[in-house]
Image: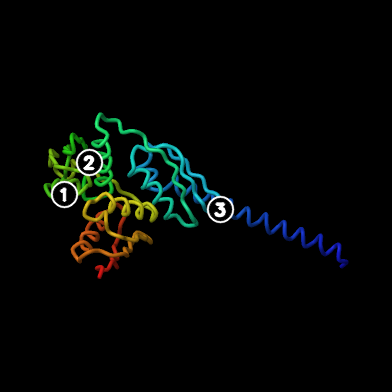
Amino acid sequence: MNAKYAVVIASVITLSLGASAGLRASELDDRIQAAANNSYAFRTYLKDDDIKVESKDGTVTLTGTVSGLSHRLLAEDTVAALPGVKEVRNDLQIKPPETSGMVDGVISARVKFALLFHRSVSATTQVNVKDGVVTLTGPASSQAEKDLATEYTREVEGVKDVDNQMTVVPASSAQPTLSGQIDDASITAQVKVDLLLNRSTSVLRTDVTTENGVVTLRGTARNQAEIDLVTKLVEDINGVKDVKNEMKVED
């Protein structure tokens, strides 16, 4: 084989390898975009938002508009937890709340998310906020469920008081909570946002990973009571099968 022919062959091989790598990268980006749009979080909690997902070499850019900061964070955390994602650029814009009180609108969005994430409270609970006072209405399958809705709502940052007017009805008549198979990325995102919304856990440094519905928590807390609270909150998140809490009490 002469030198000229060898150079030509080498060039062809290089171009072929480059094209193959480019194809694989493109396929990965397509999978990332599809996984984001088909995730439980996007199909359930973010279905009314206008979100466009674009991936290039594993770097994902989110554009469009969402109804609140919680939605913006949930979209970012969901995508960040997907396999193959290297970085997330969150350019999502937040629409002004459709309410006369901007602060009340923000609180309302936080409460709705905090309740939606938990399987032990009804997904049909109605939330109304006036001057920081939250009124809850709708069905509850038991007094325990009603009390838990009050507890979760009271812990949301910005809530001043809770007026729970939910009606306790037989379990067979109550509206079902959200169910079904939930992907790991959506579970991770739910956990992160829920801990951020809760005033008792928002300051904690917590790392969250999920594999086959089992959530592992790492990080630090000020005392054992905070660690126990995190476990309690996460155990009730939609899709969570088990919780491994490896958080430590800070020195």
Query: Alpha-carbon distance for marks 2 and 3?
Result: 43 Å
129 in relation to 176, above or below? above
Q: Earlier in the sequence, mark 1 or mark 3?
A: 3
Residue found at the very far front of the displayed protein: 251
Distance Cα–Cα, label 2 vs label 1: 20 Å
Q: Of tags 2 and 3, which is closer to the observer?
A: 3
Mark 1 Cα-neighbour bin, 10 Å: few <14, some 14–19, many ≥20 = few
* Residue 18 image offset from top left, x and y in percent: 68, 57
Q: Nearer the viewer, residue 57 or 29?
A: 57
Q: Nearer the viewer, residue 221 or 41?
A: 221
Cβ–Cβ below 8 Å for labels 1 and 3?
no
Q: Picture coordinates of residue 45 (x, y %)?
A: 34, 43
Q: Secondary structure at mark 2?
A: loop
Q: CA distance from mark 1 to mark 3?
A: 44 Å
Instruction: Between residue 206 and residue 20, name the one nearer to us.
Output: 206
Looking at numbered disc 3 in the image, what kind of residue is underneath it? Asp
Q: Which residue is mark 3?
A: 57
Residue to which mark 1 is pinned? 151
* Residue annotated with mark 2: 175
